[in-house]
Amino acid sequence: MLNSLSNYLHKKDRLRLVALLTTPVLWLVVAYLGALAMLLVTAFFTIDGFTGNVIQQFNLGNFQDMLTDAAYKNVVLRTLGIAISVTLICSVLAIPMAFYMAKIARPRSQKILVALVLTPLWASYLVKIYAWRTMLEPGNGVLDWLLGPIGIHSPGFGGPAIIIGLSYLWLPYMILPIYAGLERLPNNLLDASGDLGAHNFYTFRKVILPLIFPSLVAGSMFTFSLSLGDYITAQIIGGKLQMLGNVVYQNFSINLPFAATIAMIPVSIMALYLYLVRRTGALASM
Amino acid sequence: MTISRNARLLLASLLGVGLAFIYVPLSVVIINSFNASKTFSWPPSQFTTMWWSKAIENTGVREALKWSVLAGLSATAIALILGTCLAFAVSRYQFFGREVISLLVVLPISLPGVVTGIALNNAFTKQLGMSTGLLTVVIGHATFCIVIVYNNAIARLRRMGTSLQEASMDLGANGITTFRLITLPNLASALFAGGLLAFGLSFDEIVVTTFTAGPGIQTLPIWIYNNLFRPNQAPIVNVVAATLVVLSIVPIYLSQRLSQDTTTGGRF
């Protein structure tokens, strides 16, 4: 019975394709896209100020509120600033690390270094932010104890803490694509540049950087997008500072339509970012 | 390659600084779990293993671990089936909308967790009238785990090609036998890596879980989060945190041993 079914399916190529596709596509379209679409629709509803129930009447009030209130503009700008800073910090830290791993380390230590960079990815997200809470604790934190003697003090909880915490979380996501990109880069290109008289930094700027640009873009997709929607880091080490995610989170239980409206901001920014990335062609050459 | 000694030293020290940046906070977590003081104090003046034995007996932690494993295994199982089906369809067939599938499948992890979270919560509770619980958590987790399995499986399927399968069929094996003896064994390590990663992702997830788990379910991350700001629970939280840091070595060890193409743990 099973065998005859198998033979039957083998002859019917299209039927096999349909059998493979139906469940996963239904799952993603119904459970995921459906939910997203309903959220988008909800963004155009309002709530009854008295009962707190959602009134299903199409209007643009939420978008007006969002665009006219300067507080939201500040949150958007702050969140963008944080996401961009995190991306820059991760790039600056990741490039020399990845370069050493890919081009200088011996094959044996190379494997160990990759493992060392990867391991923290498997350590819990919350644990890592919690670790930074103990690091940054003003006064008796680890950072003050460690770097206090050389005059560096913890910035305390707030914007800088969020940037440090998020950079810490996403750094491996930046190192790995750059490492992969550098590994593919032939050594003789660097030799040629050196033989033609370029010094290290010039080679880096004119040869290495353009060639690993797609890897940087790939890394930035993680560092930028993951920072953009984060709210837990801000809750734990951000002090009173709010990011877009916090505004969504807070409005979720009191005013779902407005939370949905705000949620459209990171989604649109990501869509625009992906579009720009596609236009640079960085993804195609990965 | 010719890199001057100074440049080498500079790069090595930058690597050192980077690794210190990564590992100092993690070490602090582990050391802190042995800190005898009930409130946070650094450096620890006395060490104890008392909190470890207390944490092992803690029913809240055990319960949370149970939910995390249950949700993780269920989500991984679903993701393995759906992700593999999609990978077969996209790698072995030409059809209308094939490119859309690869976009559709990455969307759940590309969009911010909080957006996915409130969208699912709204759909489950408001539109479908479901109550939140293990089922909704599993649906949420499986949705963003599919892409992980899909990526691992499709990379392997593309590299495998179809010649082995064709040879098997030419020698008289039917579809099921070929799948059992040829395709699956060749695919197994990629599926294992994908499944491992999917489980890891689900086990660590907090944002989507916050919105899809009802009050009755606390996964481990939710438990940590709920107890993070309770001073009398701090020592137990420290132990749980330290355990999770130490456990992160396991998947790396497994995936490094498994095969070359999964040395990155399948994340890329």
Image (cartoon, coloured by chain):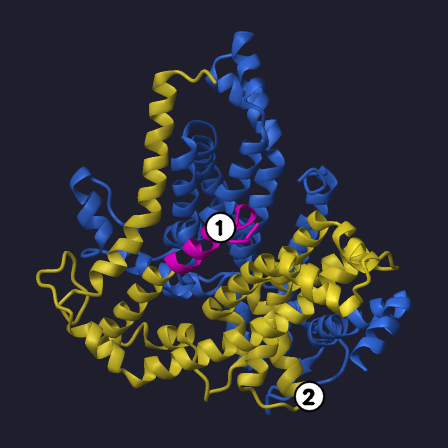
Chain colours: A blue, B yellow
Q: Which chain letter matches label 2?
A: B
Determine which residue is flagged by label 1.
Answer: A82
Q: Amino acid at mark 2?
A: Leu
Determine whether, in the image, residue B231 is placed left or right of residue A254: left
Whole-percent x, y for residue A87 in the image: 51, 44
Question: What range of the chain is rendered magenta?
Answer: B249-268
Instruction: Specify the quadrant of the image occupied by residue A38.
Output: bottom right
Q: Amino acid at mark 1?
A: Ile
Residue at the spot 70% in from the left edge and 60% down from the top edge = B183
Observer-nearest residue: A113 or A175?
Answer: A113
Label 2 crowd bin: few (<14), some (14–19), many (20+), radius 10 Å: few
Instruction: Specify the quadrant of the image occupied by residue A263.
Output: bottom right
Label 2's element?
loop
Label 1 crowd bin: few (<14), some (14–19), many (20+), radius 10 Å: many
Whole-percent x, y for residue A63 in the image: 68, 67
Q: Which chain letter matches label 1?
A: A
Residue A279 numbered tag: none
Q: Is residue A255 above or below residue B15?
A: below
Residue B128 numbered tag: 2
Observer-nearest residue: B50 or B255?
Answer: B255
Label 1's element?
helix
